Image (spheres, helix red, strand yellow):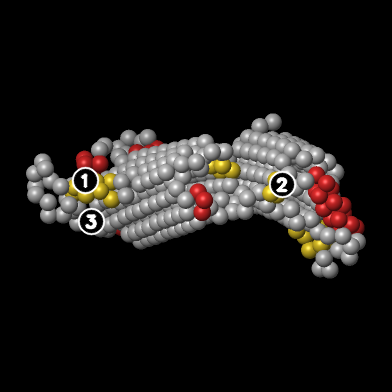
Amino acid sequence: MSASANSGATPAKTRLTAAQLKRILQSQRRYVEGWWGGRPAALAHHDLSGLDLSNENLSGADLTGANLQGCKLDGARLERTNLFVADLRLASLEGADLSKADLRGARLWGARLERARLNDADLREGALAVPGAAKSADASYETQPADLQSIQAKGADFSGARLAGAALSMAQLTDATLIRADLTAADLRRTNLTGANLNSADLRDAKLNDAVMRGAVLTDANLNGAELRGVDITGAIIDPGALADAIGRHELQGAALRRIAAEKLAKLLQLHAQWIDSDGREGERALLSDTDLSGHDLRNVNLALAELTHVALRRANLSGALLAACDLSLADLRGANLTGADLRGATLTHAHLGGALLAGADLGPLEGVGAERVEIATNLEGAKLDGADLRRATLRRAKFDEADLAGARLDGADLTAADLGRARNNRTKS
């Protein structure tokens, strides 16, 4: 259905009685279940504001121009639903499925979309008839972009979504999946994209000024003409040369990685070992944040309690290494060998571990810490573990909130009491 076909002079919103709405929803349920007499809900231009429609199956319903302000739609099924220019401001859609929904010109300002599915949804601009326009074939229309400003969409899936020209400023898109999303000319200023997966996304001419993209994945993304002034890209994975035609690339935030000579690194490791063995009375703690240690042979090294935030360890050999309680947040460990490594109580938030070897590694809790003998769980929140080898690894009590485990090998792993409830793409292969 075309935009103009959906667009007429905006009619007054109709408010249904509870009995009328119940009959419509019953018919909708029969429709989605394939029963005789069922029909999709025809709720175009209806006033449904404030209603609780949680977990309702409204797939294929017509909600064109409907007022859904403040609605509770948590867990609702809205696949292929027509929500053209619908008003969803401040609606709650946590865990809702809006796959392939028509949301052109929809208003979602301030809506809650945590872990919602919007893959292949259409969120481009929509055309509306101008009120009072002449009733003729030449009636004038105005377009409005889809308004997603200030949405709360942590962990939401926008894969393949059409968001060209959409208003997304100040949105919370932490750990969101935006693979192959069309974001050309979209307004993403001051948006939080920490840990977001923007692989193969089209960001041409997008406005990203002052956005936060810490630990984001931007492999194969098109950033030509994108405005990047003040963007924080600490720990982001970006292809070489991808920023060549971006605007404001010299104003990016995020420390550049520094190289360390082999002799200096050996000395730092020696001092750290002394610091560990003497309980801090001798030597010096290793502070290696923002360094590039890619490809180094660090087998059996003792870096427990080391500061390793935003460190590059691509293809490094860390087999048997002692990394307990160290901070590896935003680290790039793609392809690293961590076989048999001790990572108890380590912080790996938004770390990149794609293809890493972690077979037999210990990522269980660090127990009996300090005078109060507290337990510190290994934190893998937002970590990218796609294709990682975790066979026979110890993952007891590990935190995996919004971690990406697509294709990870977990056979034989100890997952006792591990927090996997909000892990994403938890598909394993033996």
- Inspect this view and state whether residue 245 appears: yes
Task: Give the side of residue 359 with respect to residue 251, left or right.
Answer: right
Mark 1 vs mark 3, foreground winner is 1
Quarter residue 272 falls in: bottom right
Mark 1 or 3, nearer chain start: 1
Look at 50% across and 56% down and name the residue there. 230
Residue positioned most to the right: 278
Q: Indicate which disc residue 259 carries.
A: 2
Q: Nearer the viewer, residue 424 or 324?
A: 324
Look at 70% across and 54% down and name the residue there. 289
> Type of residue at label 2?
Arg
Mark 2 vs mark 3, foreground winner is 2
Which quarter of the rendered picture does the N terminus lie within?
top left
- Inspect this view and state whether residue 77 appears: no
Mark 1 vs mark 2, foreground winner is 2
Mark 1 → mark 2, Cα distance in angstroms:
59 Å
Q: Indicate which disc residue 7 carries.
A: 1
Q: Indicate which disc residue 93 carries.
A: none
Residue 267 placed where, x, y %?
85, 51
Quarter residue 391 falls in: top right
Q: Are marks 1 and 3 in contact (CB under 8 Å)?
A: no
Quarter residue 278 falls in: bottom right
Q: Indicate which disc residue 14 carries.
A: 3
Task: Give the side of residue 419 with respect to residue 46, left or right.
Answer: right
Element at badge 2? strand
Which quarter of the rendered picture does the C terminus lie within?
top right
> Type of residue at label 3?
Thr
Look at 31% across and 41% down and name the residue there. 40
Q: Are marks 2 and 3 in contact (CB under 8 Å)?
A: no
46 in relation to 201, above or below: below
